[in-house]
Image (cartoon, grey):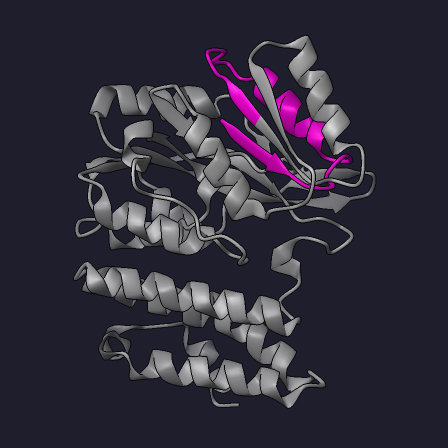
């Protein structure tokens, strides 16, 4: 497992404990402290000193999540690899289910469901599997393909999957940008000879109460640009692979899940260029040939007409 983190001292112990609690104990983890200014480095170092399954790498200055993951990939010497962000948690049977599935099927990777974990009182509490993730991962499909299961393309996060290490021989994350996993995920789906999806929840994705997660910073124009570039890039990868049904599925999901929050932010944003960038993106999506086949939620009509 590749576990990057920066300034996550409040959450890293739970992430590492979720690895220690796995029912499948045959794992190794590369912990990458990406230039933290808090105690993240000390937490990672203590874990590596007390358990030989942990190995620690430290960046004196932050190089970003994409670069941290790429460095981890280059160091993996096991047949399988996976990712866990240092502020999230694996469910206890996650590695067992994903690795056992791959052993049975011989697929290039296996993907599971995930849930958001939000602060309630004094603790973070996992929610339910959201509809678009359920559509991507349920029911179980073994040795499937994107043409057979285009809605799999909704599961775009790096940390919901375990892959064969050889599958990453020429696959790396973009660096110096946010939302670096979206384009990579679509490349995984389009390149795979076969992949597996399972309905089991494998990760609890922490939505930080202080709002410091990158997904909570979309009102910032640089983050918006990276976000829109990731959406465009993912669609482009699917287009280039000729995966038209997957493009249609992505358009439906983008219109249902991604566009409305951006429209809401744009309506009150002090910089008119924010709204202009969102508007231009919506126009691009509408101009795609697959748009005519997409059937987004009808409640979006008002939002898209702003």
Q: Is residue 22 left or right of residue 255?
A: right
Identify whether 241 is placed above or below 87.
Answer: below
Q: Position of residue 135 (x, y in %)?
A: 36, 50
> Residue sitting at 54 percent across and 56 percent down?
176
Q: Give the camera-side residue of 275 and 301.
A: 275
Q: Give the camera-side residue of 21 and 234.
A: 234
Highlighted range, magenta = 1-30
Q: Give the camera-side residue of 36 and 181.
A: 36
Is residue 9 inside the magenta stretch? yes
Q: Position of residue 30 (x, y in %)?
A: 54, 25
Q: Position of residue 87 (x, y in %)?
A: 65, 38
Is residue 304 inside the magenta stretch? no
Q: Is residue 227 left or right of residue 190?
A: right
> Residue sitting at 39 percent across and 23 percent down?
97
Identify whether 250 is placed above or below 261.
Answer: above
Name the image quarter holding residue 240: bottom left
> Residue sitting at 45 percent across and 38 percent down?
160
């Amino acid at each position: 497992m590749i576990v990057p983190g920066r300034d996550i001292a409040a959450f890293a112990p739970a992430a590492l404990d979720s690895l220690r609690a796995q029912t499948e104990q045959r794992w190794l983890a590369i912990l990458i402290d990406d230039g933290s200014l808090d105690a993240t480095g000390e937490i990672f170092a203590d874990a590596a000193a007390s358990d030989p399954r942990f190995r620690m790498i430290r960046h004196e200055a932050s190089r970003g999540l994409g670069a941290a993951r790429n460095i981890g990939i280059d160091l993996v010497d096991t047949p399988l690899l996976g990712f866990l962000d240092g502020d999230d948690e694996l469910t206890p049977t996650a590695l067992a289910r994903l690795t056992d599935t791959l052993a049975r099927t011989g697929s290039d990777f296996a993907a599971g469901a995930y849930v958001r974990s939000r602060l309630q009182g004094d603790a973070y509490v996992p929610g339910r599997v959201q509809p678009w993730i359920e559509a991507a991962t349920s029911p179980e499909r073994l040795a499937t393909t994107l043409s057979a299961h285009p809605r799999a393309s909704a599961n775009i996060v790096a940390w919901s999957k375990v892959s064969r290490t050889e599958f990453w021989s020429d696959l790396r994350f973009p660096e110096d940008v946010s939302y670096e996993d979206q384009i990579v995920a679509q490349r995984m789906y389009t390149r795979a000879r076969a992949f597996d999806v399972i309905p089991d929840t494998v990760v609890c994705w922490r939505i930080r109460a202080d709002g410091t997660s990158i997904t909570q910073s979309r009102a910032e124009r640089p983050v918006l640009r990276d976000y829109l570039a990731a959406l465009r890039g993912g669609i482009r990868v699917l287009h280039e692979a000729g995966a038209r049904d997957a493009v249609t599925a992505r358009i439906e999901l983008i219109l249902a899940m991604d566009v409305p929050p951006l429209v809401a932010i744009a309506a009150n944003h002090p910089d008119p260029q924010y709204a202009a960038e969102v508007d231009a993106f919506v126009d691009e999506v509408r101009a795609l040939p697959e748009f005519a086949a997409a059937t987004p939620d009808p409640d979006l009509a008002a939002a898209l007409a702003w």
